[in-house]
Amino acid sequence: MSETSAETVGLVPAAGLGIRLGGALPKAFVSLAGRPLLSWAIDGLRESGAVGKIVVICGADLLTRAREIAGPHVTVVAGGAERSDSVRAGLAAAGTPRFVLVHDAARCLTPPSLIRSVAAAVWNGAPAVVPALPVVDTIKTVDDHGVVTGTPDRSALRAIQTPQGFDFRLLADAHRESVDEARAVTDDAMLMERAGVPVATVQGDPYAFKITTPLDLALAEAIVASRGANVR
Ligand code: CTP
Ligand code: MG
């Protein structure tokens, strides 16, 4: 492990309910090829070699199960109702590292190479970094009745993934100072944007897709099966 990775904490928000997936368990605890999404996500972070410590944030009722999955070297804390509440809980348990990577448990097949590329960008001085991919669909805005009101220029749109990398102090301060504002944001980079911090992008990776619906889980199962069981 490099000196810089020793100063980098990986936060894994895993406290969501997985309503859109519709499984019997919260999403991070749903099985992919025989083991929970959370286990796959932690393995990816470990394999990247980019983090010296991992903090998992899960539902308060699943702390014991998450500790079994994550093993003795991972800190596990309870999250909150919104994703930003969970990230804030994770930040509070992270100590005072120089850098943080926030990585959704639901992006469980994210290649370690993408995690390293985000880490490298923050280590090189970018205060905030997100993986970005060009948008393939035409995106439209609609009004309350579903009537189209506009078509933004697709060439300027990006789909954003995780891990998102930050200067730890900047992200911790932003979460502390804007609890109510943070509830309305869907990713951590939005808090940085609102604070006027420049957010850099690195090339995203299709395999860092988020498992949201049953179709996504079927895709993940097919990917893992094509690689041979239980191999990343
Ligand atoms: N998350 C979290 N705490 C919350 C909500 C979400 O830690 N209160 C985490 C999820 O566990 C997931 C990531 O944030 O790893 C991205 O959220 P999302 O894909 O929306 O997952 P869920 O909230 O679980 O799914 P849904 O919105 O369908 O219920
Ligand atoms: Mg959600």
Image (cartoon, rainbow, N blue to C red):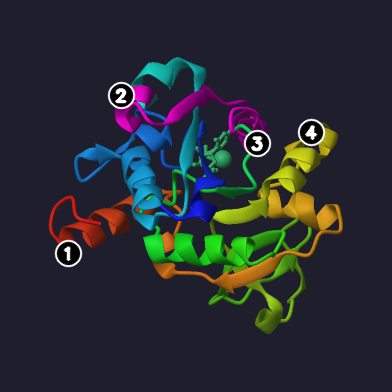
Q: Residues within 10 Å of mark 3 (few under 14, many from 20)?
A: some
- Mark closer to the chain start, 2 or 1: 2
- Examine the rendered structure and indicate whether residue 175 appears above or below residue 72: below
For the residues labelled 3 and 2, the Cα–Cα distance comes to 26 Å
Residues shaded magenta: 67-94
Tell whether 91 sits left or right of 192: left
**In what element is the residue under mark 3?**
loop
- Mark closer to the chain start, 3 or 2: 2
The x and y percentages for residue 85 are 67, 31
Q: Which residue is mark 1?
A: 226
- Examine the rendered structure and indicate whether residue 152 appears above or below residue 170: below
Q: Residues within 10 Å of mark 1 (few under 14, many from 20)?
A: few
For the residues labelled 3 and 4, the Cα–Cα distance comes to 14 Å
For the residues labelled 4 and 1, the Cα–Cα distance comes to 44 Å
**In what element is the residue under mark 1?**
helix
Q: Which residue is mark 4?
A: 176
The x and y percentages for residue 93 are 59, 28
Task: Tell me, yes or no, if residue 37 can be seen here.
Answer: yes
Q: Which residue is mark 2?
A: 68
For the residues labelled 4 and 2, the Cα–Cα distance comes to 30 Å
Tell whether 118 sits left or right of 65: right
Give me the residue at 40% from left, 66% from top. Answer: 113
- Mark closer to the chain start, 4 or 1: 4
Determine the image quadrant of residue 124.
bottom right
